[in-house]
Image (cartoon, rainbow, N blue to C red):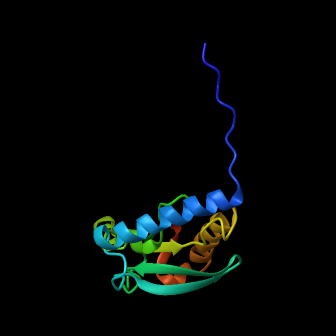
Amino acid sequence: MKRVPSEKTFAKEQIQRKVNRHRWLINIFGRRMMGIGKKPAGAEMFFDTEAGRVRVLAYGLERTETLPLFVNIHGGGFVMGSPEMDDRFMPGIAAKANVKLISVDYSLAPEAPFPVALNECYAVVKYAKEHAAELGVDSERIAV
């Protein structure tokens, strides 16, 4: 019978080195594969939320009709990444799904420890619901 290995612990410095290495890799490959570094297709906006000022990239908000809203939370486990990672896909998703779309630029751990990023994402959804008329979205049709 195999024994379960003991829990592995990491020093704060080890975690920071791993995070920095992964961010470096994403930065290098992201620029080539995802077009990061180019001017984003989304319009840069800032929402003053209960969690502070949060940057978003917005797609389709210039459309005049009231539409559902899709809130995109990019991948990266709240540790790495940016809304620019998904930028090349967002205009197509907004058009095909017939929605307005915002992509949240949440703060990253470990500099912003949990639950800072989660609170920012929640605050953006709450802000969008409360300001639906200004954004031209249906406050009852918001998807994350």
Residue 124 occupies quadrant: bottom right
Q: Nearer the viewer, residue 17 or 108?
A: 17
Question: Which residue is more in the foreground, 105 or 36?
Answer: 36
Q: Quadrant of the N terminus?
A: top right
In this orientation, does residue 18 appear?
yes
Q: Is residue 77 left or right of residue 24?
A: right
Q: Position of residue 94 (x, y in %)?
A: 34, 71
What residue sits 70% from the left and 76% below the top? Answer: 51
In the rendered image, residue 54, in percent from the top left (x then y), is placed at 60, 80
- What residue is drawn where x is 68% and y is 50%? 10
Left or right: residue 39 versus residue 71 is left
Q: Compared with residue 56, is residue 20 higher up or lower down, i.e. above or below? A: above
Q: Where is residue 31 in the image (x, y as percent from the top left)?
A: 34, 73
Give the total of numbered labels.
0
Above/below status of 88 relative to 14: below
Give the vertical position of 133 relative to 82 (above or below).
Answer: below
Residue sitting at the far top = 1
Query: From this viewpoint, is residue 95 visible?
Result: no
Image location of residue 144, percent across then percent down: 50, 61
In the image, what residue occupies the spot 45% across and 79% down?
57
- The residue located at (66%, 70%) in the rendering is 111
